[in-house]
Image (cartoon, rainbow, N blue to C red):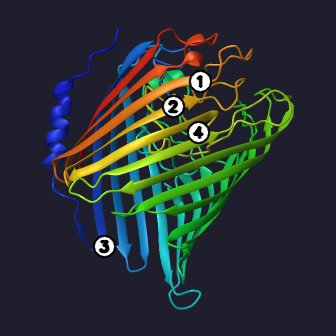
Amino acid sequence: MKRAFPFAMIGVAVAALVGAAPAWAGDGLALGGSMRLRFEEIEGQPRAGFDRDDSLFNIRTQLLAEYRSGAFRAGAELFDSRAYGADPGTPISTNEVNAMELVQAYVAGDIAEPFGKGSKLSLMAGRFTLNLGSRRLVAADDYRNTTNGYTGLRADLIAPQGVKAVFIYTLPQQRRPDDSNGVRNKRVRIDHEGFDLVLWGGIVSKARAIGPAMAELSYFHLGERDEPGRPTRDRSLDTFGGRIIREPETGRFDYEVEAFYQTGHISASLAPTAARQSVGASFLHADAGYSFAGPWKPRLSVEFDRASGDRRGGRYGRFDTLFGMRRADLAPAGLYNAVARTNIMTPGIRLEATPAKRWDWFAAYRALWLASRTDAFSTTGVRDAAERSGRFAGHQMEARLRYWVVPSRLRFEFDGLLLAKGRFLRDAPNAPAGKWTRYSSFNLTASF
């Protein structure tokens, strides 16, 4: 039975935040923050091993302080992410809970014209969040209740003629505690960073490289190794990417194509003596859209995503999206969390609009297939090694509506999703029973 949550406290918290003084700046100091309240529920969970029907209440609080003096700045941000109402069959993890964590604590500075007129170099060190390029490999996830933090060094370069570059060397923060008891009891423990998990690389881009389109090249290396009591797959992954994008513009067609190829090595299992496999994996995203004139500013687009899965023999083929986001392209995380950038092939169509400054919405449809019949479908854990269940996973329909109840201070968001399970998600040996999945979340975010 689900535990009741004192919803009266929610109203008090929201009222306090909405009525708080706005972020202020004085003597170079700026303060701000937000609190997001979310209730989500699911019927017909498509992931293997969890409750068929479930609900969860999430609270995420952020407090940010930043001091600026000329070209110098220093900042800190506290995240407090908690979840309530989980039972033993609820898929709850460090994706939902990370209590009282100083995700950001950094110093940074800008150097004007280090390489001649029009150039600028920005340097940052410490703990920080990252949103790089398309955010498909390195991001600070926003829909999820917890975020990704990174500890290390960052350098941003702006050069003449529209050239930009960003380079990082980081130790991704590993959220702690990560055991079931610690997560469910929302225990406070400092996240771990160490040379057992390293991410480095960068992106170079040029505006108007191909007509009005921007071109981008990227490379990231992820290195992972075991720590005492914490076995890993010992990933050593090199991911090479390229992207071409023309941003949406009223009355014009836009497009984006991004591709990654991943190579390296990975252990066949968590066992210390497991054999090492070479990696050969890939990902492709493509979309084309048109933005119509008019007060609603509608944009219609068609999309295609394919991420490779593993196959018998040969190289390991399951694409690893590293620390990328999923919501903007594919589907919500949270209790659903079934569709991500791995072992999937999916065409789709999307309609989005901004009827007024206070609200916006989108609706999308996707057909879902497995890229590899022998691998688990995306992040569901559902697998048919005998290849007797086909490769069609289903039809996914989703929508999102956001409305500013109090402009810039209080925003409501609704997310709804319906999955009509295809043959694979109905017939695979470990597929949860049922033909439909229904997911919804109601969110209220107060900012100050």
Q: Nearer the viewer, mark 4 or mark 2?
A: 2
Mark earlier in primary sequence (1, 4): 4
Q: Amino acid at mark 3?
A: Gly
Q: Decide: marks 4, 2 in contact (CB < 8 A)? A: no
Q: Which residue is mark 1?
A: 392
Which residue is located at x 40 percent, y 43 percent? 350
Q: Amino acid at mark 1?
A: Phe
Q: Which residue is mark 2?
A: 367
Mark earlier in primary sequence (1, 3): 3
Closest to the observer, 230 or 406: 406
Mark earlier in primary sequence (4, 2): 4
Q: In the image, which disc is placed on residue 28?
A: 3
Q: Residues within 10 Å of mark 2 (few under 14, many from 20)?
A: some
Give coordinates of residue 178: x percent, y percent: 55, 30
Q: Nearer the viewer, mark 2 or mark 3?
A: 2
C-alpha distance separating marks 4 and 2: 14 Å
Q: Decide: marks 1, 2 in contact (CB < 8 A)? A: yes
C-alpha distance separating marks 2 and 3: 51 Å
Q: Decide: marks 2, 3 in contact (CB < 8 A)? A: no
Q: Nearer the viewer, mark 1 or mark 3?
A: 1
**Seen in the image, is 313 located left or right of residue 3?**
right
Q: Amino acid at mark 2?
A: Ala
Residue 270, can we see it?
Answer: yes
Q: State which quadrant residue 292 falls in.
A: bottom left
Q: Which residue is mark 4?
A: 341
Q: Decide: marks 4, 3 in contact (CB < 8 A)? A: no
In what quadrant of the picture does the N terminus appear?
top left
